[in-house]
Amino acid sequence: MKTCVRFLLLLVTVCISAGCANITAPTGGKKDTIPPKLVSVEPADSLLDTNVKRIEMYFDEYITVSDVTKEVELSPILAVQPVVTSNNKHVVVKIVDSLLEKNTTYRVSFGKAIKDLHEGNPFIGKGKNGYTYTFSTGPYFDSLELKGKVISAATGLPDTGGVLVVLYSAKDKDSAVVKHKPKYVTRANAKGDYTFKGLPGRSFRIYALKDPNNNLIYDGPMTGEMIAFNEQPVTPGDTSQKPVLLRLFSEVVDTANKNTDSVKKATDSIANNTGFKRKKESGNVSYSVNLDTTNAAKRTFDITKPIKLTFTKSTQLNKDKISLSYDSSDISVPAGITITADTAHPLVYRICPGSPGDMQWLEDKVYTLKLAKGFAKDTAGKDLMPSRYTFRSREDDDYGKIQLHLPTKYFGSHFVLMVTTDNDTVYQKPVLDTVVSLVRLKPGKYTFRVIVDKNGNGKWDTGDLFLKLQPEEVIPYPEELKLRAGFEHVIDFEEKPKSLSNSKDKAQSR
């Protein structure tokens, strides 16, 4: 007994002196970064004259399968997609072989669906985009290609929003794209280029889709989806085949069934996006103006625009109670104004000095807008609250200038020049001169395009899928212009974008 006690005391002493009370977990070694390796596959890859209904894959470590609907693709697509399951080191793919077509090459690509169990390292295989298993129900493998480009019909520039390009059998009806999934699918790259490889020598209907819900079916413009089509069926060929251009567009939304709240929603949207404003309320009626009154010493008001007076409900307006004046040598000078209702928005009124087509704002002046008592009444006859707004106008040097030189081939009323900045169109008129000068442009990014206006209505018109109507062609200038205040840019529409540097800094010449 004494011997045991002595042994225990000795053991405790040794542990304390060695610091063995600080117990730490083992580090576990280096993190596994090696992806799973495929040991064997049955039946073998790349078989001919075979209807494969079950693929069994064996790996060198425990694996798991995830995101099957997103990562695993069978091309051409079947009405029933493959079922993929995993167990330990084994993956099984089941295919409804009764749906396989004769003399057709099928490819099952796995993307990053197969991963090792513990670290999630994806099985890639030798393929650039993941492992692909191939078999043919005929005596050869399909090897033809089809390539092309997707552009935005509205801008004429490549569409970079993850657009899908799909192929249907030429024997399918036009309505197939809205009823069922296509045969083949590929994705356009950031430049809008797309390529189908390994296609059979058959004819196809070809479409491009912007498909937010990823169901591979065109659900119409009400869902925000876009479409492009080629008028005639296309047939794959060798690598020298001419690319197929697809122009992506949004169809016109049917507005016949809009509810009665649409006017109110539109007005609320205007009131919330008019920039700087001050809202005055009277009962259930309020109004706002697009003026910045925080600092009258700062030039804030755009002298190319009218003042907008926006109401939330119908009112009785007394224009005689609305006045505009400006300071001149400490004297308030009345400015003659014109007040007009906005035809597109019945609750919005435009106020400007001079006439609507010839606004006469003075540069760098302190203006005062006065809404006197009785300027507006609600439907009950109650006066809205009066108000007063003081603001300063901008001057010419707060703006930039652009001079565009257009080639004679774009001259004529059936060509329309369109200049935009952000979501605003600043110029849209037929090309009746080869030189177009734009002044008093706010600093920002500008784009330029020429519309081939076939119907002569002075604007760009979108397409219609079932009427087989293509959108009007748009010829873009290939680069944005970043316009700064006090600068004048001269642009040759057909020159390379380097012509954007041909500018004059008028701010330095003052």
Image: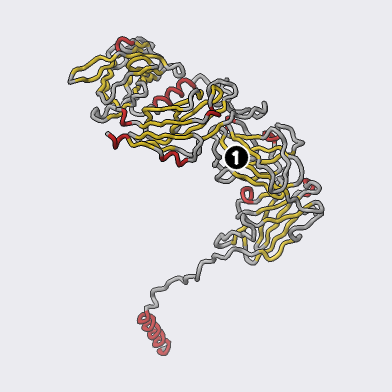
Q: Residue furthest left?
A: 330
Quadrant housing the C terminus: top left
Asked if residue 383 lies left or right of residue 473, the reply is left
x and y percent of residue 289 in the render? 34, 22
Q: Quadrant of residue 399?
A: top left
The colour style of the image is secondary structure
Asked if residue 384 lies left or right of residue 158, the reply is left
Q: Quadrant of residue 110?
A: bottom right
The one of 61 and 211 positioned closer to us in this rendering: 211
Asked if residue 242 lies left or right of residue 272, the reply is right
The one of 44 and 168 positioned closer to us in this rendering: 168
The one of 44 and 489 positioned closer to us in this rendering: 489
Which residue shows up at 75% across the image and 58% down it?
Answer: 46
Q: Quadrant of residue 389?
A: top left
| Any part of residue 461 in sight | yes
Q: Residue furthest bottom?
A: 3
x and y percent of residue 26 in the render? 47, 72
The one of 85 and 75 positioned closer to us in this rendering: 75
State whether residue 316 is above or below residue 131.
above
State whether residue 295 is above or below residue 50.
above
Label 1 crowd (10 A; few <14 / some 14-19 / many >=20): many
